[in-house]
Amino acid sequence: MSENRFRRKAPAIMARLIADFPQLEPEDAAAILGNIGGETGGFRLLQEQRPLVKGSRGGYGWCQWTGPRRRAFEAWCQRHDLDPASDEANYGYLCLELRGPEKRALDALRAASTLADKTIAFERAFERAGIPHHDARIRWAEIAIAEYLAWHPPVPDVPSPRSPKSANEPPTPAPRDHDAAPPPRQPDDPGPEPQSDAARTLPWWHPRRLWLWITSGGAGLGGLAWITDPLAWAKAAAVLTAVAVITGAVVFVAALLLFGRQRVAEYIATRVRRRR
């Protein structure tokens, strides 16, 4: 049987059904598409070829609506200015029936377990065909679910990072002293005393080291200038003061840009409190 048109259209229609009827699972939607495929030969034939009732117009549309249901479908299309052969008209009227006079078909669909059972249940509750041809409907449903899963692969179940412990799992050992969390600090507690410079090694770019280098270099230049020319000492002191002021301003502005005004203010307040 020609399947290409059905394979192209079925996944999108299934996704739309699942979105419009949140209670439907992919297999439920596939069962509906399996019945549509069986009724139309995979969307190839909208008009029933050999009506069971001689002289009648037979069934028409995705679901081969027959008799009063066909007349109601055509009247609904006329009221909404839709072509009865269009996908929009057929999908719209299918949803109208599933929300109204044929909504019991959804209950029968969801009550079944397997894809084959769901396909047969929908035929009996919704289509009520004279000659059901269940095998063909199930075949179309299998094609529909395969194409849908190719478009929308199922998401694997991922265990949570911390799954509940089983009864046989040994308890977590108590933390050692160096793993224990420190006691909570009081609001007015400034925290542990900072280590001295001798107890830690600061990187070369740390403000304290930069300040030490600047002052040491300035003192060395000043001493050399005093030996050679006392007047040059005053000039060196002025240059050193200017460099110190500019460096301090640059460091302060950089701190404001990197850490924000609030954090810088908190750091300064903490340093002043500790010095007291």
Image (cartoon, rainbow, N blue to C red):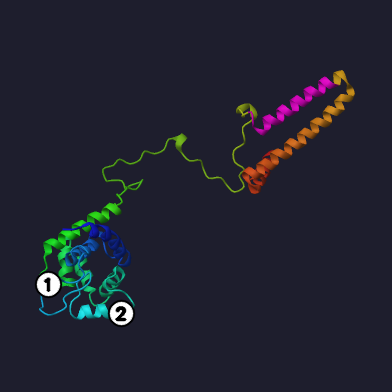
User: Could you tell me what secondary structure mostly forms the magenta stretch?
Assistant: helix
Judge whether residue 272 can be spotted in this image.
no
**Which quarter of the figure has residue 254?**
top right
Is residue 255 something that shows in the picture?
A: yes
Q: Where, quadrant-wise, is the N terminus in this rendering?
A: bottom left
Range drawn in magenta: 204-225
Q: Is residue 261 above or below residue 205?
A: below
Please name whichever residue, 160 or 136, is drawn nearer the observer in this view of the structure: 136
Task: Specify the quadrant that holds the C terminus.
Answer: top right
Give the residue displayed 77% in from the left and 33% down from the top.
243
Residue 74 image offset from top left, x and y in percent: 26, 78
Q: Residues within 10 Å of mark 2 (few under 14, many from 20)?
A: few
Q: Secondary structure at mark 1?
A: loop
Disc 2 and disc 1: Cα gap in Å?
Answer: 26 Å
> Foreground residue, 188 or 96?
96
Q: Within 10 Å of the Cα at label 1, are there few (<14), some (14-19), or many (20+) other Cα atoms? A: few
Q: Which mark is residue 124?
A: none
Identify the residue position indicated by label 1 in the image.
Answer: 50
- Residue 213 relative to residue 86: left or right: right
Residue holding disc 2? 78
Residue at 75% over, 28% down:
215
